[in-house]
């Protein structure tokens, strides 16, 4: 017997928030500073001449995700899920963070389901 099942709209997961970050000596340039809670897809493009990486630190100070080393000209990626809060990020290569490769972003309330 076939029983039709209606799939409620909220059962469809929203697409991940996307962020593009450029890394250069010695700064990051991110396409956005706030994003909704939920899935995140962050891409790191190294447009500099040194190796760089991107590490996300959670509101409680623990590392949440990182790209690993991204070589010059290459693209790194983070796919993670973040709750509301204020996050910081930095490049962990040598003294890059102290030279300016650090910052923060805010994760806001989840977008209302449609
Ligand atoms: Cu760096």
Image (cartoon, helix red, strand yellow):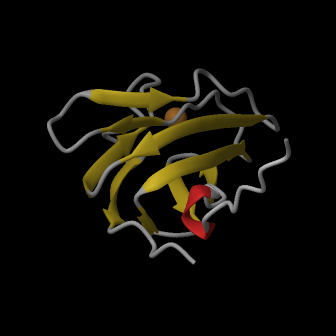
Q: Quadrant of residue 106?
A: bottom left
Assign the N terminus to one quadrant of the image: top right
Assign the C terminus to one quadrant of the image: bottom right
| Residue 31 x %, y % | 60, 68
Q: Quadrant of residue 72?
A: top right
- As rendered, which of 11 and 55 lies closer to the eye? 11
Q: Quadrant of residue 46?
A: top right
Q: Is residue 61 above or below residue 37?
A: above
Please state if 113 lies on the left or on the right of 108 as rendered. Answer: right
- As rendered, which of 98 and 90 lies closer to the eye? 90
- Please tell me which residue is depicted at 74% across the width and 47% down the height of the picture: 47
- Please tell me which residue is depicted at 45% across the width and 76% down the height of the picture: 112
Please state if 81 lies on the left or on the right of 5 as rendered. Answer: left
- Please tell me which residue is depicted at 58% across the width and 21% down the height of the picture: 68
- As rendered, which of 110 and 96 lies closer to the eye? 110
Q: Which residue is the extreme one toward the left?
A: 60
């Amino acid at each position: 017997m076939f029983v039709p099942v209606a799939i409620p709209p909220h059962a469809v997961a929203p697409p991940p928030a996307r962020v593009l970050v450029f890394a250069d000596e010695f700064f990051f340039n991110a396409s956005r500073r706030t994003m909704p809670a939920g899935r995140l897809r962050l891409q790191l493009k190294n447009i500099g001449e040194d190796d760089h990486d991107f590490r996300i630190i959670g509101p409680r100070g623990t590392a949440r995700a990182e790209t690993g080393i991204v070589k010059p000209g290459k693209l790194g990626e983070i796919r993670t899920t973040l709750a509301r809060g204020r996050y910081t990020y930095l490049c962990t290569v040598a003294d890059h963070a102290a030279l300016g490769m650090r910052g923060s972003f805010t994760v806001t309330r989840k977008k209302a389901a449609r």
